[in-house]
Amino acid sequence: MGVWLNCHTPIAMRASAVITPATLRELINRYYEAGARDLHGLDLQGLDLSSAHLSDADLRRANLSRANLSRATLNHIDGYQLNLAQADLRSASLADAVLREADLRKAHCHRASLINADLRAGCLSHADLRHADLEGANLTKREFDKE
């Protein structure tokens, strides 16, 4: 996982910093709160982002496989080719999210809100969609339970 540092990065983090999952979560939260929304291509697999607020974020081609996104707010994200395989999306809100060609294999979407989400050509194989709200979601050319 690559982390880019710039002149605004604290000096303590510039010299061979060890980025723990908690530190990375805090950096993402601060980055987002500062108005930045570009998280595309980041490898965030397995990260605990439960209850995170990432609405309108650019998550194209990011890797959030096995990430904990339970109760997260991901409304209006651009998640083209986003990897959410085995992610915990229980009670998460992904209303109006663009998830075209996204990988949600074995994702835990119990009680998730996918209202008006664009899931075209996405992989939902073995995803837990029990009690998920898919009202208005575009599911054309999606893949369900295909081995």
Image (cartoon, rainbow, N blue to C red):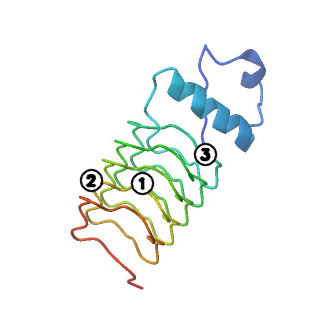
**Residue 54, x across and y down, in percent:** 48, 38
Residue at horizontal 58 percent and vertical 48 percent from the top: 44
User: Is residue 4 something one can see in this rendering?
Assistant: no
**Residue 118, x across and y down, in percent:** 27, 56
- Report the Cα–Cα distance between label 2 and label 3: 23 Å
In the foreground, 96 or 10? 96
Q: Which amino acid type is shown beneath numbered disc 2?
A: Asn
Report whether 131 appears left or right of 108: left
**Residue 91, x across and y down, in percent:** 51, 55
- Report the Cα–Cα distance between label 1 and label 3: 15 Å
- Between discs 1 and 3, the one toward the N terminus: 3
- Between discs 2 and 1, the one toward the N terminus: 1
Q: Secondary structure at mark 2?
A: loop
Dot 2 crowding, Cα within 10 Å, few <14, some 14–19, many 20+: some
Q: Secondary structure at mark 1?
A: loop
Q: Are marks 2 and 1 in contact (CB under 8 Å)?
A: no
Q: Secondary structure at mark 3?
A: loop
* Residue picked out by circle 3: 49
- Report the Cα–Cα distance between label 2 and label 1: 17 Å
Dot 3 crowding, Cα within 10 Å, few <14, some 14–19, many 20+: many
* Residue picked out by circle 2: 116
User: Is residue 80 something one can see in this rendering?
Assistant: yes
Q: Which amino acid type is shown beneath numbered disc 3?
A: Leu
Nearer to us of marks 1 and 3 is: 3
**Residue 23, x across and y down, in percent:** 72, 35
Q: Which amino acid type is shown beneath numbered disc 1?
A: Leu
Report whether 30 appears left or right of 101: right
* Residue picked out by circle 1: 82
Residue at horizontal 44 percent and vertical 44 percent from the top: 74
Q: Are marks 1 and 3 in contact (CB under 8 Å)?
A: no
| Residue 4 location, quadrant | top right
Report whether 143 appears left or right of 82: left
